[in-house]
Image (cartoon, rainbow, N blue to C red):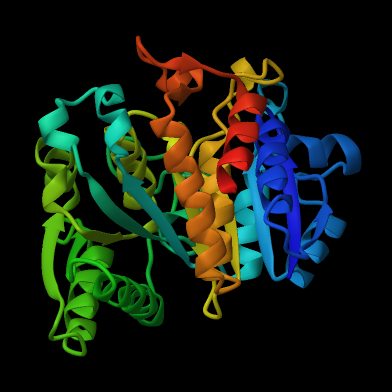
Amino acid sequence: MKIAVLPGDGIGPEIIHEAIKVLSALGESFEMEIAQVGGAGYAAHGHPLPEGTLKLAKEADAVLFGAVGDYQYDKLERALRPEQAILGLRKELGLFANLRPAILYPELAGASTLKPEVVSGLDILIIRELTGDIYFGKPRGVRECPDGPFAGQREGFDTMRYAEGEIRRIAHVAFQAARKRDRRVTSVDKANVLETFQFWRDIVTEVHREYADVELEHMYVDNAAMQLVRAPKKFDVIVTGNMFGDILSDAAAMLTGSIGMLPSASLDANSKGLYEPSHGSAPDIAGKGVANPLATILSAAMMLRFSFGRMDAADRIENAVKRVLAQGLRTPDIHEPGTTRVGTKEMGDAVVAALA
Ligand code: IPM
Ligand code: MG
């Protein structure tokens, strides 16, 4: 079990450190190799996804990823910005299926900005297509506007596109995931306006014929955004494209009170995966020892489950996290009166202690 560990920028190294601690405490023999990525990759090797890092990620059985991005790299040209590291890894490793669970732990019901009755018991799974759509479509760029009232001016443009096979494979992932849950899939699109997403709807409907035991509902993305904050518990599995999934998964994450709690997995066709917290690099709190390491620790659990088939070890970590929450330990992002405020390291230590 070889793991490429890519801490990245901001709070990335701190939270990854805690996840490594938890993995090491399991008493298994993991081979872990650390490499730089994002701004750290640029600083060390002149590129956000250095060749050596990409090679390591390709060789490894799984990638454990922290976060990338920092203010000081914001002015670099796009190809050198930290975000290119994660986009490049997704593309190069063929990680097309992004699983973003949004689970509300009962202890954290008060941390959500929504009323407890709206979110308590929330357990939804967002499956976001990750290597297609307007994110990677070509052509893209800035050109001279060919016609209309702004003809002759510069215009920015991107290309939204999905190939049939791309839609089929993510639809299969969604229906199969639903079979392990409540057997309901909501496919989110914009079929009323966009050709790409009318096509998406048609293909998802076709694939659904193979899954008579799973319920399929189609929903426009604007309505889905509204339903997510109105009655989020009505959803089971949401499947959607790259762009809509980016937006909806942040909204879903916040339902749970803290994006600091949510892990994610990005999988290829053979369950090789990249595992990362759903949150970003939070450079404003980097180095202060206050970041919540639980999303990263839970990402390591997802890695054990999806890439290594080690359900037992994954359960052990997840149960340990539940135990520390039950003990009342909280990093500042989820702290409420009556609970015990702890830092990044103490939280990691508590999870290690709770593994036993
Ligand atoms: C995410 C992030 C990335 C995305 C950025 C950092 C490129 O927002 O993983 O959701 O847009 O996919
Ligand atoms: Mg995002």
Q: Residue at (39%, 29%) from the top-left corner? A: 258
Nearer to us in this view, 26 or 40: 26
Quarter of the view holding residue 125 = bottom left
Residue at the far bottom: name it.
Answer: 210
On screen, residue 152 above or below 86: above
Q: Residue at (31%, 31%) from the top-left corner? A: 107
> Is residue 155 shown to the viewer in this render?
no
Q: Is residue 26 shown left or right of residue 200?
A: right
Q: Is residue 318 shown left or right of residue 194?
A: right
Q: Position of residue 313 (x, y in %)?
A: 56, 62
On screen, residue 65 above or below 12: below
Quarter of the view holding residue 226 = top left
Q: Is residue 109 shown left or right of residue 260?
A: left
State the count of labels: 0
Residue at the far front: name it.
Answer: 356
Q: Residue at (54%, 73%) from the top-left corner? A: 268
- Which corner quadrant holds the N terminus? bottom right
Quarter of the view holding residue 47 = top right
On screen, residue 34 above or below 11: below
> Is residue 84 shown to the viewer in this render?
yes
Nearer to us in this view, 68 or 317: 317
On screen, residue 350 above or below 24: above
